[in-house]
Image (spheres, grey):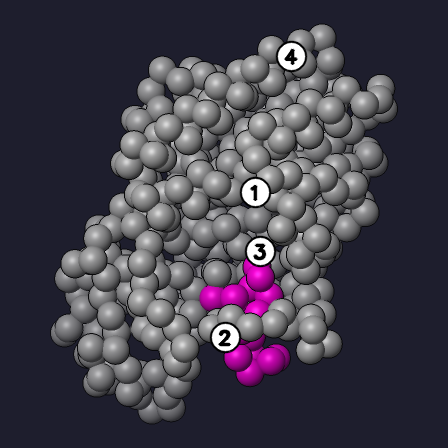
Amino acid sequence: MKPDYSNAGLVNLMASIYNAVGYPIDSYPSLGVMDEYQIGKSRNIVFMLMDGLGYEYVKQQGANSYIEKNTCARLSSVFPTTTSSALTTLASGLAPQQHAVTGWFMYLKELGMVSAILPFRARIGGETLSTCGVLLDDVIDIAMAMPRITRKSTVVSQRNIVDSDYSLLAHQGAEKKGYTSLSEYFRHIYQTVMASDEAKYIYAYWPSFDEHCHVYGVDNPRTKTHFAQIDQQLEQLVSSLQGSDTTIVLTADHGLLDTNIESVINLDKYPNIMECLSLPLSGEPRTAYCNIRMNMAQQFENRVLDQLSNYCDLHRSADLIAENYFGFGEVHPQLNNRIGDYVLLAKNNYVIKDRVLGEGDFSQIGVHGGLSDQELYVPLVVFQT
């Protein structure tokens, strides 16, 4: 499995949306299924991103929900199937091959460190790198779409991240509205739509479904209850916006699957593999990037194939670029540095982890980053009022 960047992926959806709001993108083709909606004619376009809400979840656990009944297509996410990579695709209209945001943890050669890119800090935490004088736009050095669209733009996001380094970069020039609850999230969307008759683009991000999956698991009743709350308030929003000339597009950045403690492969327990690495792992627990010490590539390959083949597939990173896992077309000059020499792609529900000093044990139940159906596919849901 790998993402579809040609006609059925998030990157194609964003080409359609940005074409409709006055910022044509020709790097990737638009999404054919969106043509019938003619969203450029709508006074208001609301893009709702439900972090972690996979297509398989909607069709199985969410069967007969309002969202499931209005799902019109299955889209593929990007690779890896993770928030940082997908959000940057949504903000720019580019695939990871062009924007080079390659996972939650990224090796930044220009800084000589492994970072957590969305909070923009070192892997183990601490102050943001911007407090040290490092600018995020020197690391993510691509054109973002929002400052270039022709409509008034508004971002609705959690109050604690609406003014983060990443949000300030990705959503330059947009009005920002922060919330602390699900009802406030939907209220901000409604009020922004109804505030004026001018043409508007509203980007509304909800991260808590993903958080529920990480903490409780995809199949946990608390996660299902949270989904039902989203579903109910969405139906109320659509009803309240009837006659407002609004198109609502709802999708997700990725889905998740459940793991367990027996499926966490701690690489520290394989010292002869660890000795081959020149850096800590980066990427995701389901897609781990490995930087190899000089003259140890063959030993690394042999040891991984001998000891880890039940848990993961081994790929040369350059092969995944050549096979269009990250996109197609021009390759960002930092992409090769940020995906290491090899990639460990986890099988089944395994995760691959190491630890650095000061870092706790891996404790997530719901996980993502890999290429299972549950992680790769997201729903496309469209309402017009």
Q: Residues within 10 Å of mark 3 (few under 14, many from 20)?
A: few
Front residue of 26 and 269:
269
Q: SS at mark 1? A: helix
Q: CA distance from mark 1 to mark 2?
A: 27 Å
Q: Answer left or right for 308 relative to 219.
A: left
Can you tell which quarter of the image residue 382 is in? top right
The three-letter amino acid code for the residue at tag 2 is Val
Residue 325 percent across, percent down from the top left? 43, 54
The three-letter amino acid code for the residue at tag 1 is Val
Q: Which residue is mark 4?
A: 240
Q: Which residue is mark 3?
A: 329
Furthest residue in direction bottom, as rendered: 295
Q: Nearer the viewer, mark 1 or mark 2?
A: 2
Q: Which residue is mark 1?
A: 11
Q: CA distance from mark 2 to mark 3?
A: 27 Å
Q: CA distance from mark 3 to mark 4?
A: 43 Å
Residue under the image location 81 percent in, 23 percent down = 195
Q: SS at mark 3? A: loop
Compared to residue 180, the image places residue 356 above or below, namely below
Q: Answer left or right for 332 relative to 339.
A: right
Q: Which residues are magenta?
A: 105-122
Q: CA distance from mark 2 to mark 4?
A: 46 Å
Q: Nearer the viewer, mark 2 or mark 4?
A: 4
